[in-house]
Amino acid sequence: MIGFQTLFYKEVLRFWKVATQTLTAPIVTAMLYLVIFGHVLEGRVEVYPGVGYTAFLIPGLVMMSILQNAFANTSSSLIQSKITGNLVFVMLPPLSHWELFNAYVLASVVRGFGVGAGVFVVTAWFAKLSFVAPWWILIFALLGAFMLGTMGLIAGIWAEKFDQLAAFQNFVIMPATFLSGVFYSIHSLPPMWQTVSHFNPFFYMIDGFRFGFFGQSDVNPLLSLSIVGAFTLLLAVIAVGMLKSGYKLRH
């Protein structure tokens, strides 16, 4: 376990050393979203009966922050190691592919949870929140951070320069996040876009996470859990396979 513990500590220390950029900045961004959208739409939109728009928005922002920062942690770590050439010092020690996978992904879960907790603390003052099913909140937060950390690992392995990673983030992660129901219920969309939303795994993560707060959701949380779990397992198999083969890592 020494190799895993050392790499995990190195990855956590990497983002902690620049906490202003990796932790504080995402929290401020989420705060701005809440202030702007909450101010404009509070009292005008009621997504769930008896739930104000600001209260509805907070869980979405928390989950969005967890997902985006979990992805950013693994992807940025790997691409920086490739560009600077220090990836060799990670690949030379006798670390198994499982140790590499767990260290990178668990560090991304820590960062995602750190940002998510910070967003919750600074936004929870703006609305009264209930915690109908806290275990659902924890389960979807863990699965979401794990899944996006794994996706970031895949993107970091695949990308060979910052432009490729930026394209992955701008054309895959950002659209999937913003079109997942963070700011709205999919029932407010036209039928065609409702159908499209059901093919977005990010939608099920945010919808299930929000169910834990209000006991209300657009789809059954068990369905959301099964889809998110299956997608997470698929990504984990792909990521472990890439690490085991040394794809774009062992040149």
Image (cartoon, helix red, strand yellow):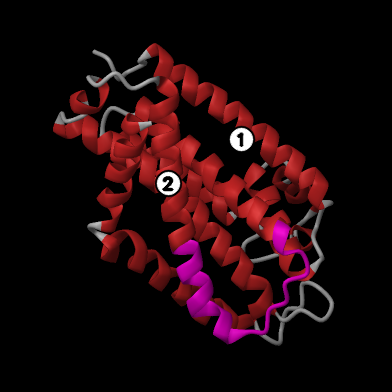
Point out the stretch of residues depicted in magenta.
115-135
Disc number at residue 232?
1
Horizontal side of residue 238 vs 91, given as left or right: right
- Identify which residue is drawn at 61% across, 27% down: 234
Q: Position of residue 39 (x, y in %)?
A: 57, 85
Residue type at tag 2: Ser
- Identify which residue is drawn at 65% across, 34% down: 231
Q: Secondary structure at mark 1?
A: helix
- Identify which residue is drawn at 52% across, 22% down: 238
Residue type at tag 1: Thr
Give whichever of discs 2 and 1 has the lower sequence position.
2
Q: Quadrant of residue 43?
A: bottom right
Q: Residues within 10 Å of mark 2 (few under 14, many from 20)?
A: many
Q: Is residue 239 above or below residue 42?
A: above
Quadrant location of the C terminus in the rendered image: top left
Q: Residues within 10 Å of mark 1 (few under 14, many from 20)?
A: many
Count of numbered circles in the view = 2
121 inside magenta stretch: yes
Horizontal side of residue 23 vs 133, given as left or right: left
In front of the other: 8 or 41? 8
In front of the other: 60 or 95? 95
Estimate the spatial distance between the alpha carbons at disc 2 and disc 1, rounded to whole Å: 14 Å
Q: Which residue is mark 2?
A: 108
Q: Secondary structure at mark 2?
A: helix
